[in-house]
Image: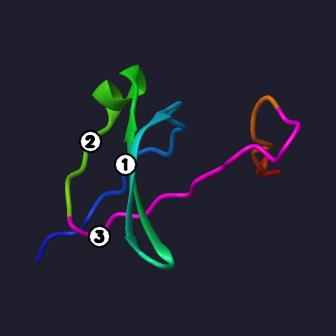
Amino acid sequence: MTTAVAAPFRFFSLRVVTTRRLGPSLLRVTLGGADLRHFASDGRDQSLSLFLPHPGQDAPRVPVER
């Protein structure tokens, strides 16, 4: 049996390339940007957190782990 090793956590600065409405409450968002060259997926069990700026903010507020 092999043990999975988690990739180091990092942020990627991306932009919205396209959006497509798939249903009344479902939207497909395609992201792109130069940071994606550092993205690697070594498995099927992937997760992500999406941080968006609130109206009036230039950038999202990202939680800081203490």
**Location of residue 23 (image quadrant):** bottom left
**CA–CA distance in space, label 2 to label 1:** 9 Å
Q: Which mark is residue 45?
A: 3
> In this figure, which residue is indicated by the disc labeled 2?
40
Q: Amino acid at mark 2?
A: Ala
The crowding category of the residue bearing disc 1, from other C-alpha atoms within 10 Å (few below 14, some 14 to 19, many at least 20), is few
Residue 59 appears left or right of 13 = right
Residue at figure coordinates x 41%, y 25% from the top left: 35
24 and 39: which is toward the camera: 24
The crowding category of the residue bearing disc 2, from other C-alpha atoms within 10 Å (few below 14, some 14 to 19, many at least 20), is few
**CA–CA distance in space, label 3 to label 1:** 12 Å
Mark 2 touches mark 3? (CB < 8 Å): no
Q: Which mark is residue 51?
A: none
The location of residue 18, given as percent across then percent down, is 38, 42
Q: Main secondary structure of the magenta part?
A: loop
Q: Amino acid at mark 1?
A: Ala
Q: Is residue 61 above or below residue 24?
A: above
Residue at figure coordinates x 34%, y 31% from the top left: 36
The crowding category of the residue bearing disc 3, from other C-alpha atoms within 10 Å (few below 14, some 14 to 19, many at least 20), is few
For the magenta stretch, what is the residue range?
44-57
Mark 2 touches mark 1? (CB < 8 Å): yes
Residue 64 appears left or right of 44 = right
The residue tagged with tag 2: helix, strand or loop?
A: loop
